[in-house]
Amino acid sequence: MKTADIMARLQAKYPLEKEYLQAVEEVLESIEEVYNQHPEFEAVKIVERLVEPDRIFTFRVNWIDDNGQVQTNTGYRVQFNSAIGPYKGGLRFHRAVTPSMLKFLGFEQTFKNALTTLPMGGAKGGADFDPAGKSDAEIMRFCQAFMLELWNCIGPDQDIPAGDVGVGGREIGYLNGMYTKLARRYNTGVLTGKGMSFGGSILRPEATGFGALYFTQHLLAAAGKSIEGKNIAISGFGNVAWGAATKAVQLGAKVIAISGPDGVCHIPDGITKEMIDYMLVMRASNRNRVEDMADRFPGKAIFTPGKKAWSIPCDIALPCAFQNELSGEDAQELKANGCWCCCEVSNMGCRPEAIHFFQHNGVLFAPGKAVNAGGVATSGLEMTQNASHISWSAKEVDEKLHYIMHSIHEQCVKYGTQPDGSIDYVKGANIAGFMKVAQAMLEQGVC
Ligand code: 2IT
């Protein structure tokens, strides 16, 4: 297999699908050498099959806004790969959602889920619906209309969606209510990230951020460093950024910046519990403005419009917002300001130039599919609890999450350790995830 040949074919076939092509190229470059040492994979065209989703459902979603006007959006579910288990992955509601975005996310999810040690295949879905400025009633009607189209394609042993950007606990509640009504199935295991009163797992809301910090701790320990007292810059103020900020503070670090689409808040004394709580209020408001933090905590959070979190000097950068949010220039600015570690928490948060710069300029870097896998892993734990009709304590879930993040780090070390002893976490995560999926495909024949 030659990455260049496969990429040329995919580029000709999907010339406009930039995010998808970017995600596939990153993985293929990492695995090419190992793949070519396995002629049994090549014999059954594992890579050619793995880069294409199993199937994509596309559907129109009609709903009525608060003014009585009919609105139309497009919804999707990309069932990417089921070699190691039922399809699993989040739903994204964002105005920029396209098949390319969901194919990249489904592709990444396939490897991420393989890393979790749990039996889950990869999927992603969502709609080009923009939650910004929508009322609660509009969000509910949209979720119900979306599920009216989706319910037939999913099921607890088939495909289990969850949240992602624009889909949190509130949206999962509305989606689950409609699924239950349509399917007349009261087994609560078809969506994860549910409320605690109807089958949700304790710690699922925090899990992506907590897991990211546990992974960061392992990465720092492997480099002979610790997180205590370090300055951390975080992008975003959604569920993932909130969990990351909470755990960072618990572990003795100082979060000195959070950012949003409108700019950055510099927090020189470090984020407080009140500010972390306020992130949830900002997210729920659908205003999508980080300046609200500066208005609420004058003098403590200093807002600069149009700037990113990466303009604030820090030790550790944690992108927690959106794909390609950290550019090559951002990486250079971070390094020039003293940053020496970047753990990507968002899916494909860093541009390839940024990753290249970090890796060649002594900045420790780990990719999203390893760092953020604690979210979907805890979704897997929610599925286990639902299937066995029990619920675990916070301690039990947290211990399992710790174990999983440790195991993901070990897999990165196993497959990513370089001849000079350094760890290439991009290679490590991609090869470890790939080997598991490829082996599962091989053993199950061409189907
Ligand atoms: O990107 C992700 O891993 C998620 N949005 C979570 C998916 C899940 O099924 O919990």
Image: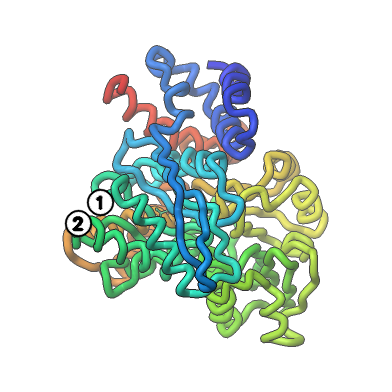
- Going 64% across and 28% down the picture, which residue do you hit? 15
Q: Nearer the viewer, residue 406 or 377?
A: 377
Residue 373 position, x and y percent, is 45, 52
Q: Secondary structure at mark 1?
A: loop
Task: Give the number of the disc on residue 387.
Answer: 2
Question: Could you tell me the amino acid type at mark 2?
Answer: Ala
> Contact (CB < 8 A) between labels 1 and 2?
yes
Q: Is residue 368 left or right of residue 404?
A: right
Q: Nearer the viewer, residue 408 or 259?
A: 259
Whether disc 1's CB lies below 8 Å from ligand 1 is answered no
- Vertical placement of residue 209 versus 149, above or below: below
Residue 237 position, x and y percent, is 60, 69
Q: Secondary structure at mark 2?
A: helix
Residue 367 position, x and y percent, is 57, 46
Task: Give the number of the disc on residue 422.
Answer: none
- Going 38% across and 27% down the picture, which residue do you hit? 438
Mark 1 packing: few (<14 Cα in 10 Å), some, or many (20+)?
some
- Going 75% across and 62% down the picture, which residue do you hit? 308
Viewer can see residue 232: yes
* C-alpha separation, residue under disc 1 versus residue under disc 2: 9 Å
- Going 19% across and 56% down the picture, which residue do you hit? 387
- Vertical placement of residue 177 versus 83, above or below: below
Viewer can see residue 429: no
Sequence-wise, the earlier of marks 1 and 2 is: 1
Question: Could you tell me the amino acid type at mark 1?
Answer: Pro
Q: Nearer the viewer, residue 312 or 182?
A: 182
Q: Nearer the viewer, residue 25 or 179?
A: 179
Find residue 2 and report its image quarter.
Answer: top right
Placement of the C terminus among the 4 image quadrants: top left
Q: Which residue is mark 1?
A: 156
